Amino acid sequence: MTRGVGHLLFLPVWHQRGLRAGERRSAVFTHSAGALAPADLAVTMTWSSPATFSLFLLLLLLLGQAPPSNPQSLGTVKLRLVGPGSRPEEGRLEVLHQGQWGTVCDDDFGLQEATVACRQLGFEAALTWAHSAKYGQGEGPIWLDNVRCGGTESSLDQCGSNGWGVSDCSHSEDVGVVCHPKRQRGYFSEKVSNALGPQGRRLEEVRLKPILASAKRRLPVTEGAVEVKYEGHWRQVCDQGWTMNNSRVVCGMLGFPSEVPVNNPYYRKVWNLKLKDPKSRLKGLTNKNSFWIHRVNCLGTEPHMANCQVQVAPAQGKLRPACPGGMHAVVNCVAGPRFRPPKAKPRRKESREEELRVRLRSGAQVGEGRVEVLMNRQWGTVCDHRWDLISASVVCRQLGFGSAREALFGAQLGQGLGPIHLSEVRCRGYERTLSDCLALEGSQNGCQHDNDAAVRCNVPDMGFQSQVRLAGGRSPEEGIVEVQVEVNGVQRWGTVCSDHWGLNEAMVVCRQLGLGFASHAIKDTWYWQGTPGAGEVVMSGVGCLGTEQALQQCQRHGPVHCSHGTGRFSAGVSCTSSAPDLVMNAQLVQETAYLEDRPLSLLYCAHEENCLSRSADHMDWPYGHRRLLRFSSQIYNLGRADFRPKTGRHSWIWHQCHRHYHSIEVFTHYDLLTLNGSKVAEGHKASFCLEDTNCPAGMQRRYACANFGEQGVTVGCWDTYRHDIDCQWVDITDVGPGDYIFQVVVNPKYEVAESDFSNNMMRCRCKYDGHRVWLHNCHTGDSYRANAELSLEQEQRLRNNLI
């Protein structure tokens, strides 16, 4: 046995799977090195007894060749379930091998094998299996036959079998499986794999090398020669056989939704001039095969070039150049609207209504979030059944990003509220919008919001991350904000004035750095030491909406003016990878609203806490009453982190009258507005008891106010304020009959960071006839189509009664 060639692995089948009495014991010899397939060399031996085999194992150990437990493990293969039927947990079992999908024969297939397959697919267990092509006959190769698992393997390719493609079956014997519909904990996404072929070699990155002078000056780089980082070295791709489908895949990886043809004659002319230039090294490099990726052939729907047919070098044994007479492949990508220069015109007329039929919510970075679609004039979510990278890529491209790098399951970016519009979305990859794909209505298969689908898209490199940094913090996620700006024609690093610095601005900084959400916006940073030489304030008056990609895109002063000067009052941030997301239950407000004429004798404490209109100050206490619009509110935390008060218990304020602590002085605003936005009545609710009133079944309540306990709202739980507690009202004593807008805003002063502030406002139409009140059409601020909503800036003005 020669180690340089490979070694033989000896493993008896009865070691993998228990045999019944009387069955013959055999071993499969499998070659595990070199370019041979896992079963290119197979020899069957018969053992007279287990003792004989034990002696054989001892001999192997003496030779230093201990038998491994997984004889055919070449890395985890990819599985899928296909065939007729609408349930994602059952179907014909197919395996991806050498870039091609194939089936599995039902010979020897049983519950143990089905269990391994189901677990690999992300389900908890298998219920049963189906033989004789119950889910229809497949096409292509039958990759596996006589699969034998012990039941503990993590991947089907770790089980015994005849070997890849070694089968005496026909497609009438294709096996199917039925998995338990519950997903495994921890199986939450399908990520792009950059593995190339069975050896697992990596296409690590793709980039465009700009050639034209205009392309070199522009960010993002949209046009240039394709370069691929393969096994740590950058190579250029030969243009022979290069197609627009290849360009589409490259552009998608780089964050661009589409591609256009390039001026090949011009680039050929530039290439030839470089070859003739005696000072250029290009001619010598092109003669080396290590300079090239020989050939790429994509369908155009792949999320990564490694999923295409990629030939790194010419066929083995042929001593010929990798790109004879060719040049590097050149690609011209089209950037999405938000990544184009301000003066650039869109290449086609884009319908605003079409753009807004899909959106991403609650993502920490640009190009990621929970997928929501607009149907029947209302936004709703997408169920994760059959959700995959191809469907996710359609969403990404529709929104002006590139292809998807991750398709997420199980509400990993937060749960939505309202309807679940779509389930089992099946896209082919070329669709322009998600509505062009096949899908079921979300209500047809019992989806819940804990099945909400999400996506992370490829986005262009705008160079923003290098223009900001954090200094002096205890960890890389916190510190003084230092920015790079141009001062008198020179790029300089400096600090940001903390005047008007808040969570919106901090959110932009954390997003720009790729650090997630802001947990705190810090105005006093005397305890952090900044970078020497970067202490001067170079940016002031910063005002962000919170949606910008970089701090440099926010409004700010022209000449720097900072009332505090430099030093201890420089702006700082603390970032976190997850954040809470509070949403009001609009339906409960609508169902519980009523009027009460409450005697003043029962309102002393409420008056002390400013829960009544100003006219109450001039009444003859305790005689008379106030007319109150009362309602219950239920506030859900649908984010990925607990909602906690901004300050610790040592800073909470004791209110003697109601005998409780206020952890947040103003937790909600209640307002009654005219139809043009003028405020006619208001109320507010301090978070005197921020706790888990209820949690879903199986989840433990973590926060309770009793005995000066910790306050907060756990992820997935909700805090309920009943209609019959003090201050849970709007005082409408001075309001005349008419039509109004009833508005509730949670966390109105942005005291606590959230992943999504756009859903913090709830509105209802309100009709008051002087004796009765009706609330109808209650919805959160982002529930309906965009032209019926206000922008975030308008919402902020409305909250402050500036309209």
Image: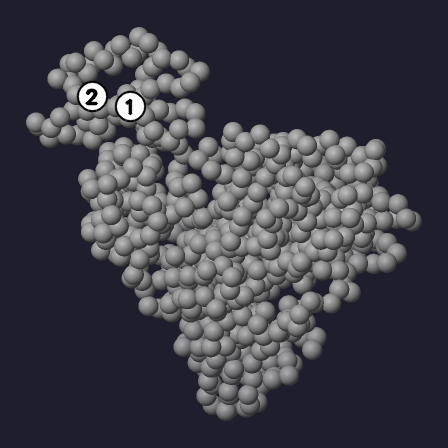
The reply to whether dot 2 and dot 1 touch (C-beta < 8 Å) is yes
Task: Indicate the secondary structure of the residue bearing disc 2.
Answer: strand
> Residue 69, image x and y in percent?
30, 25
85, 487: nearer the viewer: 85
Q: Which residue is mark 2?
A: 45
Which mark is on residue 29?
1
Q: For residue 556, which quarter of the picture?
A: bottom right
Quadrant where the image shows the N terminus: top left
Q: Is residue 435 above or below residue 455?
A: below
Q: Residue at the location (38% across, 61% down)?
A: 424
Q: Amino acid at mark 2?
A: Met
Going by the picture, which residue comes out furthest to the top? 62
> Residue 213, image x and y in percent?
81, 49
Left or right: 366, with 713 as reference point: right
Q: For residue 332, which quarter of the picture?
A: bottom right
Q: Residue at the location (42% across, 56% down)?
A: 387
Q: Amino acid at mark 1?
A: Phe
> Residue 127, image x and y in percent?
22, 49
